[in-house]
């Protein structure tokens, strides 16, 4: 019998609540598992828990190995020194890029053609090409003025546009943002001028993450359990699940998508050809809230991470009130972003309930990664 676990409910201010629940992980293709794999086995912390370098929020890989492999990890601090951080692994060597005063970086994404984008507080966008020694940093003027956070970015390989989502987490009256931006917009001013600002229902709250099955079939999630989808060139409400906030979304095709979230009690919803259905979570369930990190494996297993080092799995369509978990957890930090390729699974997190105190964790399963630079 598994030990009984305590359900953690975090009491935080609105701003801290948004910080602790603003990321997820995307699936990076074939997963580092195999048929009938136990995805709760084989995890190890890289270095040690509570690394002092930064709060860590998002991770991405190009899926390659050896000298061609590339991993990106982003994070930073939302208070104190307010520095953003990008860690870039090429082969066996990490590079560390610090961006003074920009605040926390919330998400990072790349494609097979070598384009990389990280986004974060104050409308910060960092763009570069794989192999660049200098990463271009910019802030979108209108978003900086509105104190908007960019919580998510996604684009298809070789696409001519990318998608941004976010909003102002400290302003309860502010609307969430969903922008479609042409890659031809090179500066913050260009983005302000050329971006299409999608309206949705005109009152949508924070949008937390965005993921696409293709450039024309894209999903975004956020407040009130709403799930929006780009379909035939227009954004439409694709589903609504009873929860306060979805935080993460990922998938393997347009009819194999998973959304996770829940601020007090965790929730998982899945989409198939018939639409969206809730498959885990309820107000009296024993699933830790703030599920944010998420991987959807090739065999249909959903791996989720959340508050206080919570790492769990779900498989199938049965609605669950509890989930198999990594027990005891190997980190006490909030697990916030995740990525998997055919070699390695990585989950990252930080001290996101108090982001002024830098503390990060990197959890690895499969092929090892080199120690992080300090």
Image: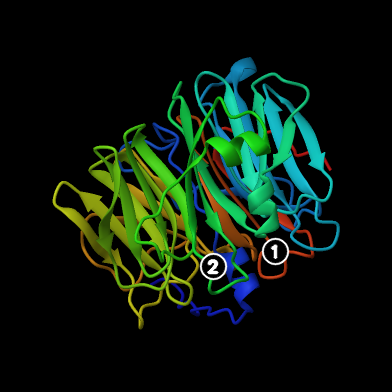
Residue drawn at the location 79% of the way across and 64% of the way down = 357
Q: What quarter of the picture does the C terminus occupy?
A: top right
Tell me where residue 372 appears, x and y as whole percent: 75, 39
Q: Please say if 47 is above or below 169.
A: above
Q: Quadrant of residue 283?
A: bottom left
- In this view, the residue in front, 96 or 48, is 96
Tell me where residue 15 appears, x and y as whole percent: 64, 71
- Taking 10 as reference, is 271 left or right? left
Judging from the image, what secondary structure is the residue with disc 2 in? Answer: loop
Alpha carbon separation for disc pair 2 and 1: 26 Å
Judging from the image, what secondary structure is the residue with disc 1 in? Answer: loop
Tell me where residue 337 appears, x and y as whole percent: 55, 50
Q: Nearer the viewer, mark 2 or mark 1?
A: 2
Q: What quarter of the picture does the N terminus occupy?
A: bottom left
- Taking 69 as reference, is 261 left or right? left
Residue drawn at the location 81% of the way across and 54% of the way down = 52
Residue 208 visible in the snapshot:
yes
Mark closest to the chain's N terminus, 2 or 1: 2
- In this view, the residue in front, 316 or 204, is 204
The residue where tag 2 is placed is 174
Say the numbered circle drawn on residue 199: none
- In this view, the residue in front, 136 or 358, is 136
Mark 1, other Cα within 10 Å: few <14 / some 14–19 / many ≥20: many
Residue 328 visible in the snapshot:
no
Q: Quadrant of residue 67?
A: top right
The residue where tag 1 is placed is 351
């Amino acid at each position: 019998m598994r030990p009984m676990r305590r359900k953690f409910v975090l009491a935080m201010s609105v701003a801290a609540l948004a910080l602790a629940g603003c990321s997820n992980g995307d699936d990076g293709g074939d997963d580092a598992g195999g048929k009938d794999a136990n995805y709760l086995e084989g995890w190890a912390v890289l270095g040690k828990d509570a690394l002092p370098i930064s709060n860590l929020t998002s991770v991405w890989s190009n899926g390659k190995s050896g000298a061609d492999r590339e991993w990106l990890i982003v994070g930073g601090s939302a208070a104190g020194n307010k520095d953003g951080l990008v860690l870039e692994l090429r082969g066996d060597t990490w590079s560390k890029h610090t961006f003074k005063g920009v605040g926390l970086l919330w998400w990072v994404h790349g494609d097979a053609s070598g384009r990389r984008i990280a986004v974060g507080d104050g409308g910060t966008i960092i763009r570069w090409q794989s192999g660049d020694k200098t990463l271009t940093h910019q802030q979108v003027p209108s978003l900086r003025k509105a104190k908007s956070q960019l919580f998510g970015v996604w684009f298809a390989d070789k696409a001519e546009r990318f998608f941004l989502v976010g909003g102002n987490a400290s302003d309860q009256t502010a609307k969430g943002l969903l922008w479609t931006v042409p890659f031809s917009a090179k500066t913050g001013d260009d983005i302000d001028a050329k971006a299409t600002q999608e309206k949705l229902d005109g009152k949508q709250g924070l949008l937390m993450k965005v993921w696409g099955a293709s450039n024309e079939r894209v999903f975004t999630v956020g407040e009130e359990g709403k799930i929006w989808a780009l379909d035939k060139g227009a954004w439409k409400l694709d589903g609504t699940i009873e929860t306060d906030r979805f935080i993460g979304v990922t998938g393997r095709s347009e009819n194999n998508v998973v959304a996770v979230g829940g601020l007090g009690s965790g929730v998982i919803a899945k989409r198939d050809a018939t639409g969206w259905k809730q498959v885990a979570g309820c107000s009296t369930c024993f699933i830790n809230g703030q599920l944010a990190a998420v991987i959807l494996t090739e065999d249909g297993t959903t791996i989720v991470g959340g508050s206080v080092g919570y790492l769990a799995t779900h498989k199938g369509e049965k609605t669950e009130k509890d989930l198999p978990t990594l027990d005891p957890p190997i980190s006490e930090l909030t697990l916030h972003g995740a990525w998997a390729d055919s070699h390695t699974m990585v989950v990252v997190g930080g001290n996101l309930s108090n982001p002024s105190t830098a503390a990060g964790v990197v959890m690895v399963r499969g092929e090892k990664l080199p120690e992080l630079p300090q």
